[in-house]
Image: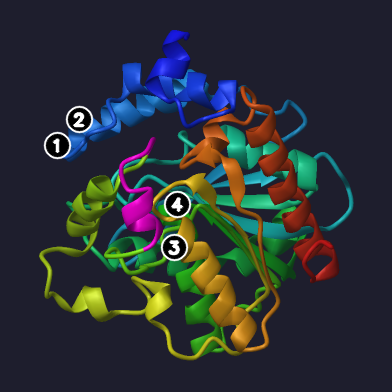
């Protein structure tokens, strides 16, 4: 048996197994005893290790928008076309503690090129220095500012899709609630990739897959405390922090969800989709049976991860251009 098979015997996909072994060498799985600064340094190294050059056809422009007494960095990715495009607001993951414009630059660039959409990225404030609702508030500010860039960057802000991975998926879902509740920007769809949406951590995939690979239940609890604060503070009952706490899912945009099977967060996606469907909202779940949390960084190493990313691209295109989920 090879070293790879010994380390992650439950994984059939050799590319994902190799991704995890390389990840472990750069960023040990157990981050509970690390400071936020140490986590960010290691995450930056990890992102650079797996990152690919941004597609040459994509044009990039960096800006800052006004937040609450601070400036929020954003990056706009424009495809090589003279036609007016839809727009995607993509929110990076990282457990609310790590990640920035650089960590997901190649992902945003590939979405821009392959889906032929304008993409907004954001560098929201991170915990624990900035606890909830700082990240959510920053993303709200960006959402409300997108229309102001439409004329200069030739996109149609009425064809807007929200997307994100992990913590970014949480924030994208929260923004969909916010936009509906406040009659805010119209959103054509939401694309949530292995999103943490606030499911019950005492059952289901949180237990059965809580210690498997890439992300553990202990990691989730640790970062949740950094993000919200000690158990009992008001954020733990806030639907904008944990969208599964919502009791009315009517009026939300169609959703495409891409959970990984070997991920304690897996059941969150199916539960969210079920609640949307019960409210009459179209929702599609494509559970990636061979994959782990953070599989996007292995999309060029693993056939299964590459196929999952292609499905995400197709969902973005379908929602952005047709306003409906792919068949």
- x, y (%) of residue 172? 51, 64
Of callouts 1 and 4, which one flags the residue occurring earlier in the amino acid sequence? 1
- In which quadrant of the rendered image does the C terminus lie? bottom right
Q: Which SS class for mark 1? A: loop
- x, y (%) of residue 286? 66, 55
- x, y (%) of residue 228? 21, 64
* Magenta range: 204-214
| Residue position marked by numbered label 3 in the rendering | 170
Question: Can residue 223 be seen at all in this image of the molecule?
Answer: yes
Q: Judge depth for marks 2 and 3 and give the one in front.
A: 3
| Residue position marked by numbered label 1 in the rendering | 35
Of callouts 1 and 3, which one flags the residue occurring earlier in the amino acid sequence? 1
Question: Can residue 71 be seen at all in this image of the molecule?
Answer: no
Q: Are marks 4 and 2 in contact (CB under 8 Å)?
A: no
| Residue position marked by numbered label 4 in the rendering | 166
Could you tell whether 80 is left or right of 263 in the image?
A: right
In the image, farthest residue toward the top:
2
Distance from the alpha carbon under mark 4 to that under mark 2: 20 Å
- x, y (%) of residue 302? 63, 26
Q: Which mark is residue 38?
A: 2
Q: Is residue 212 magenta?
A: yes
Q: Which SS class for mark 3? A: helix
Q: Are marks 1 and 2 in contact (CB under 8 Å)?
A: yes
Q: Judge depth for marks 4 and 2 and give the one in front.
A: 4
Distance from the alpha carbon under mark 1 to that under mark 2: 5 Å
Q: Which SS class for mark 4? A: loop
- Residue at the image point whose x is 44% and y is 62% from the top: 170
Task: Kindly report the secondary structure that dominates the magenta region of the rendered protein.
Answer: loop
Distance from the alpha carbon under mark 1 to that under mark 3: 23 Å
């Amino acid at each position: 048996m090879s070293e790879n098979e010994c380390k992650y015997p439950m994984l059939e996909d050799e590319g994902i197994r190799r991704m995890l072994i390389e990840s472990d060498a750069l960023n040990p799985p157990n981050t509970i005893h690390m400071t936020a600064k140490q986590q960010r340094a290691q995450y930056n190294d990890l992102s650079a290790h797996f990152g690919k050059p941004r597609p040459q056809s994509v044009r990039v422009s960096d800006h800052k928008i006004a937040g609450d007494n601070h400036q929020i960095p954003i990056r706009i990715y424009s495809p090589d076309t003279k036609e007016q495009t839809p727009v995607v607001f993509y929110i990076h993951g990282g457990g609310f503690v790590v990640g920035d414009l650089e960590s997901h630059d190649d992902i945003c660039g590939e979405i821009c090129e392959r889906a032929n959409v304008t993409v907004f990225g954001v560098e929201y404030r991170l915990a624990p220095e900035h606890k909830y609702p700082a990240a959510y508030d920053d993303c709200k500010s960006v959402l409300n500012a997108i229309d102001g860039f439409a004329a200069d960057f030739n996109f149609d802000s009425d064809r807007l899709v929200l997307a994100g991975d992990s913590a970014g998926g949480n924030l994208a879902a929260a923004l969909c609630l916010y936009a509906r509740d406040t009659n805010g920007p119209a959103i054509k769809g939401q694309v949530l990739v292995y999103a943490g949406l606030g499911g019950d951590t005492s059952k289901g995939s949180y237990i059965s897959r809580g210690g498997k690979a890439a992300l553990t239940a202990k990691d989730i609890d640790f970062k949740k405390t950094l993000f919200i604060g000690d158990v009992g503070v008001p954020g733990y009952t806030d639907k904008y922090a944990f969208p599964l706490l919502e009791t009315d899912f009517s009026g939300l945009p169609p959703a495409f969800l891409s959970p990984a099977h070997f991920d304690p967060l897996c059941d969150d996606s199916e539960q969210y989709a079920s609640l949307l469907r019960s409210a009459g909202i179209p929702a599609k779940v494509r559970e990636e049976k061979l994959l782990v949390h953070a599989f996007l960084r292995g999309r060029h190493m693993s056939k299964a991860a590459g196929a999952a990313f292609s499905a995400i691209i197709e969902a973005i295109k379908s929602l952005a251009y047709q306003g409906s989920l792919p068949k």
